[in-house]
Amino acid sequence: MSWSLGLSVGPGGVGSAVASDEGGVRLTGTFPTTGDAVRAALRENDGPPARVTLVHPSGVTMRELRSEIGDLALAGVPDDNAQLRADVEVLSALTGNHVLLIDADRDLLAAHPGRTEPFDPARLAALVAREPGEVTVALTGHPETRDRYHVEARDYAPMLVERPALAGLALQIPATSVLVTMPRTAGALRTRTPIPPVLIAIPVLAIILLLLLL
């Protein structure tokens, strides 16, 4: 039976969800690491997943993403089968609007995948006013951390987002939607081996010698 695995990385661990033709999408829990989540899913399903979608916080570094992809590979999932999606991408596909995500755990405001800035209530108000009626404000973070942000964003009725649930949403809302940016594959994160300078110089030297012989 074909199945897919959704993972959502966050400060509280890695949320996991599984989708299959027979059982639909179901959340399977939160695990300490990406590798733990993958191994638990492999034990409960037959064979490797046909697709793995990993949802990451907006603004994480390339090194952090490589670390997560490394955990996938060590757990037995080929990295070329992994699809990376930012949390804002998934929420934009869910709501059909531009999403401003307040990350209470990191004191950040994410307005677009890959672009974050320190949270500031005045900045939030300006971004909402720029596109009235077309912006959804979302809030994520531990309950004890996000209370202050909920008060400061109360005028925009923020949608509360639990990071583990993003694993299931990513499976329910494929990245082929026109509302999200083109997903990046894990292969794009691999460091390319630079061409040695001596190999670059060989064609140049050959051309010079040919000109001297003419």
Image (cartoon, grey):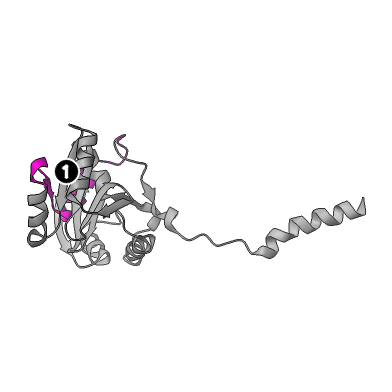
Image location of residue 140, percent across then percent down: 15, 53
Residue closest to the eye, 173 or 209 = 209
Q: Position of residue 197 (x, y in %)?
A: 66, 63
Tag 1 secondary structure? strand
| Residue at the front extreme, as displayed | 122
Mark 1 residue crowding within 10 angstroms, few (<14) / some (14–19) / many (20+): many
User: Which corner quadrant of the image does residue 155 belong to?
Assistant: top left
Where does the magenta region start and end? 153-178
Outermost residue, right side: 214
Q: Residue at x 30, y 56 (%)?
A: 48
For residue 199, side relative to residue 53 (left or right)? right
Residue at image mark 1: 137
Q: Where, by quadrant of the figure, is residue 97 drawn?
A: top left
Q: In the displayed structure, does residue 80 sit left or right of residue 87? A: right
Horizontal side of residue 97 vs 80, given as left or right: left
Question: Residue 155 colored magenta?
Answer: yes
Q: Is residue 15 left or right of residue 60?
A: left
Residue at 14% across / 57% down in the picture?
141
- The reply to whether residue 53 is visible in this rendering is no
- Toward the viewer: 204 or 59? 59
Q: Amino acid at mark 1?
A: Val
